């Protein structure tokens, strides 16, 4: 059971990274790999300063209203580039930094299904794992939501598999992060 929680979160991280990607039009057309830098801060342990996961999960991310302010597609595209770069590092502290606190905590809110201390221990060790490398294919349907979040549909390729997924991003402390995985195609 202890390892299952980490594996579940890792599967979510891989699925999300599959769903995210953005590059220049010419790179998409040519199908070449585009390398981005991971500019996110690594997760620090204990997560959320020791606040219980259930409490963090119950707290919605307060995003300025994207619907009211209008969407800066270039900003969303840049955020997607960073998320993909962090996933491609293979470093757990960066791979899981792509999620809002609320989303990640919701994965560990029920201690009968996941085990947060084991996940935190693995994060503290931060031993790089083999990471799937994703080639960015495209991004579409950047849509502001009424609650301030943004829906993004993306396409990535990893090996022989193409992923067309929809994620919901929220602005947490000035950084767009994954707050929900709306759909995965193919499912993980």
Image (cartoon, rainbow, N blue to C red):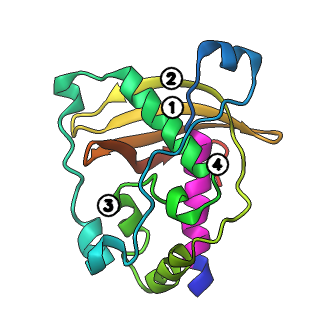
Residue 166 visible here? yes
Q: CA distance from mark 1 to mark 3?
A: 21 Å
Q: CA distance from mark 4 to mark 2?
A: 21 Å
Q: Are marks 2 and 1 in contact (CB under 8 Å)?
A: yes
Q: Earlier in the sequence, mark 4 or mark 3?
A: 4
Determine the main secondary structure of the stretch shown in magenta: helix
Q: Indicate which disc residue 153 carries.
A: 1
Q: Which residues are magenta?
A: 5-19
Q: Indicate which disc residue 102 carries.
A: 3
Residue 139 lies, in percent from the top left, at 54, 25
Mark closer to the observer (4, 3)? 4
Residue 118 lies, in percent from the top left, at 52, 84
Q: Earlier in the sequence, mark 4 or mark 1?
A: 4
For image coordinates 30% across by 71% down, the residue present is 48
To which residue does mark 2 refer?
Answer: 140
User: Around disc 2, counting alpha carbons within 10 Å, would you say few (fewer than 14), some (14 to 19), or many (20 or more)?
Assistant: few
Secondary structure, mark 4, is: loop
Residue 94 lies, in percent from the top left, at 51, 57
Q: Is 137 above or below relative to 173?
A: above
Secondary structure, mark 1, is: strand
Viewer-side residue, 41 vs 16? 41
Q: Earlier in the sequence, mark 2 or mark 1?
A: 2
The quarter of the picture where residue 70 lies is: top left
Q: CA distance from mark 4 to mark 1?
A: 19 Å
Judged left or right of residue 43, residue 71 is left
């Amino acid at each position: 059971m202890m390892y299952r929680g980490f594996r579940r979160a890792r599967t979510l991280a891989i699925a999300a990274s599959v769903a995210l990607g953005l590059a220049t039009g010419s790179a998409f057309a040519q199908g070449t790999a585009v390398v981005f830098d991971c500019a996110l801060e690594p997760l620090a342990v204990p997560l959320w300063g020791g606040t219980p996961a259930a409490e963090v999960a119950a707290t919605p991310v307060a995003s300025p209203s994207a619907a009211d302010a209008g969407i800066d597609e270039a900003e969303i595209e840049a955020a997607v580039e960073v998320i993909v770069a962090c996933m491609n590092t293979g470093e757990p502290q960066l791979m899981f930094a792509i999620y809002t606190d609320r989303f990640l905590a919701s994965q560990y809110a029920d201690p009968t299904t996941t085990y947060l201390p084991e996940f935190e221990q693995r994060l503290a060790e931060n031993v790089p794992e083999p990471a799937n490398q994703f080639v960015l294919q495209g991004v579409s349907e950047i849509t502001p939501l009424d609650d301030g979040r943004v829906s993004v549909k993306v396409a990535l390729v990893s090996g022989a598999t193409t992923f067309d997924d929809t994620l919901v991003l929220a602005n947490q402390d000035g950084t767009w992060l994954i707050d929900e995985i709306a759909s995965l195609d193919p499912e993980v």
